[in-house]
Amino acid sequence: MLKKYIYIFLISMVPLIELRGAVPVSQVMGLPIVPSFIVCIIANMLPVPIIYLFARKVLIWGADKPIIGRFFSFCLEKGEKGGKKLQAKAGRGLFVALLLFVGIPLPGTGAWTGTLAASILDMDFKSTVVAVMLGVLLAGMIMMLVSLAGVSIFL
């Protein structure tokens, strides 16, 4: 049982997959929904402070390096594009826009991209973490409902 929780914990920390992939996996594995949800939330939020404080600097540093440059440039462009799109739509409501950007489980949105975008937009740390946390909770609830509905179809 512990192996399964470790597995969904690690899935929740993977960029682009995050808890959006881990919550359905937990249900396929037959894990109880509430403990799985909590594990996925914690794991998805763990990288957020590190991303906010260091990702932008690391991506800028590595963008021109031979082996990692293309990937780092891609990540930086993705964050900048997400940040500009977020700011254009939000204007002064950047907090709510970030929350919804992270919370609506679509490809390319999530805690990693949202935090990187907030970092690029120079949002303050506290607002970023709170907005991302609320967004992760929203995405988790949506995925939990979708997963429960999907699992019940097959039972």
Image (cartoon, rainbow, N blue to C red):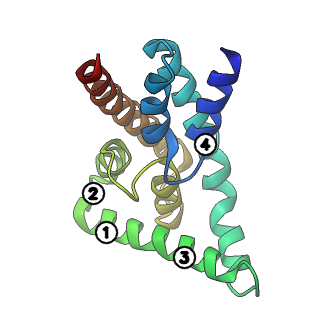
Please state which of the two labelled residues, at mark 3 or mark 2, is closer to the viewer.
Answer: 3
In the rendered image, the vertical position of residue 12 relative to residue 114, given as above or below: above
Decide which of 130, 70 is in the foreground and name it: 70
Please state which of the two labelled residues, at mark 4 or mark 2, is closer to the viewer.
Answer: 4
Q: Secondary structure at mark 4?
A: loop
Residue at x 32% of width, y 23% of height: 151
Q: Secondary structure at mark 3?
A: helix
**Pointer 2: what residue?**
92
Q: Secondary structure at mark 1?
A: helix
**Pointer 4: what residue?**
13
Please state which of the two labelled residues, at mark 1 or mark 4, is closer to the viewer.
Answer: 4
Instruction: Give residue 60's position: percent from left, percent from top.
Output: 66, 77
Query: Which label is found at residue 74?
Result: 3
Mark 2, residues whose alpha carbon is within 10 Å: few (<14), some, or many (≥20)?
few
Residue at x 35% of width, y 47% of height: 95
Q: Earlier in the sequence, mark 1 or mark 3?
A: 3
Q: Secondary structure at mark 2?
A: loop
**Pointer 1: what residue?**
85
Q: CA distance from mark 1 to mark 3?
A: 16 Å
Instruction: Give residue 87's position: percent from left, percent from top.
Output: 32, 65
Q: Quadrant of the C terminus?
A: top left
